Amino acid sequence: MNIFIAGGTGAIGRYLVPLLVAAGHKVVALSRSVDSGSPLASMGALPVFGDVYDQAQLARLVAESEAELVIQQLTAFGTKTGNPYAETMRVRIEGTRSLIAAARAAGVRRFIAQSISFVCSPLGTGLTDEETPLYLDAPSPIRAFVESVASLEQQTIDAKGMSGTVLRYGWLYGPGTSWDPSGFIPRAIREGTYPIVGSGAGTYSFISLRDAAAATVSVLAHDAAGIYNIVDDSPVRLSGWLPFAARLLGAPPPEYEDVASARERIGDIRVYYMNEQRGASNAKAKREFNWRPALASWQAGFEALYLNRTPQSRDAV
Ligand SMILES: NC(=O)c1ccc[n+]([C@@H]2O[C@H](COP(=O)([O-])OP(=O)(O)OC[C@H]3O[C@@H](n4cnc5c(N)ncnc54)[C@H](OP(=O)(O)O)[C@@H]3O)[C@@H](O)[C@H]2O)c1
């Protein structure tokens, strides 16, 4: 299949592009710069250069790629000063709109977009599934972020003349993510500035980069459309994974911080993650397109990442 991917140079894209090429697809990958796009050719993709916000240029590039499938794998966290979520919200809303318009103009019939599994309503108990409402009635700083996710998902599912798939990834860990050994979270854990907020009841569903990337290959093999959680089998509270990660990193045990003080220091969204979010179920992806995470548990993945250990998984990672 001819595939056009936006975001092929990002943390997931670097795993996804080689998997698509190995599965026999012809991949054209967008990047904004020669520097950033230079690894694409060695991954077996044809790099093309442009910005997703330049609609005319994007439409030309997608048409020239003769794509049968367009993949939206874009994020842009922390790229501007001020609100660290602003660019990612924009890319979810405007970037998705631009890509769908370019795909439609080129007669593309298939669209896959990257979403997240951890912005569902915290009301209710147990794991969330694809029917659980998004947290659109959240307090305002969180709500704007969730609205951008809702926009991406709605645009994808409603794209006229196209079959749309939304992959809601759990918390991604691996090289180049916030959980990278030199990334933001391990640094804060080592410095003792990554506390257990409240009772640490926020439940994380993790997913390794390779497993997240492999989900797209399974989606294509089974022609699956709709919304799917792509998470591992082992949801865990902050109060569970954080002390475990601290031990692996040789860091002091995490301290506790009360919710009010954490809201002041790190903001509502992160307090929601650390003390309120529910984990997500992967039952639908398993049932409908037979996807299985090779790393069923984040523990093995964290040991591989922090101790350079070969993970005990159903597959090599
Ligand atoms: N579920 C999760 O936990 C989750 C989900 C997403 C991201 N994250 C985290 O966020 C961090 C960054 O993730 P990431 O790898 O996705 O981001 P990244 O490394 O910054 O990559 C972003 C990708 O989007 C592309 N891009 C951004 N704006 C674009 C634009 N206007 N036009 C064209 N392309 C554009 C970039 O292309 P060029 O730079 O080549 O132009 C790049 O391929 C990581 O820590 C990751 O773990 C986590």
Image (cartoon, rainbow, N blue to C red):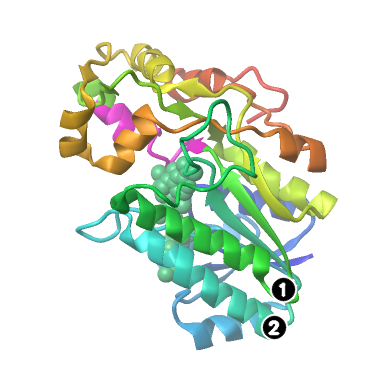
The one nearer the camera, 237 or 295, is 237
Mark 2 sits on what residue? 106
Q: Relative to residue 106, is residue 196 depicted above or below?
A: above
* Neighbourhood count class around disc 1 (C-alpha, 10 Å): few under 14, some 14–19, many 20 upward: many
Residue 233 location, x and y as percent? 63, 25
Q: Relative to residue 101, is residue 141 depicted above or below?
A: above
Classify the position of ligand 1 by quadrant: top left, top right, bottom left or bottom right: bottom left
Q: Relative to residue 167, is residue 294 depicted above or below?
A: above
- Looking at the rendered image, the quarter that the C terminus falls into is top right
- Range covered by the magenta-colored residues: 171-188
Residue drawn 71% across and 27% down? Answer: 315
Label 1 sits on what residue type?
Ala
Residue 67: numbered disc: 1
Residue 294 location, x and y as percent? 68, 28
Mark earlier in primary sequence (1, 2) = 1
Q: Residue furthest right?
A: 222
Residue drawn 71% across and 54% down? Answer: 226
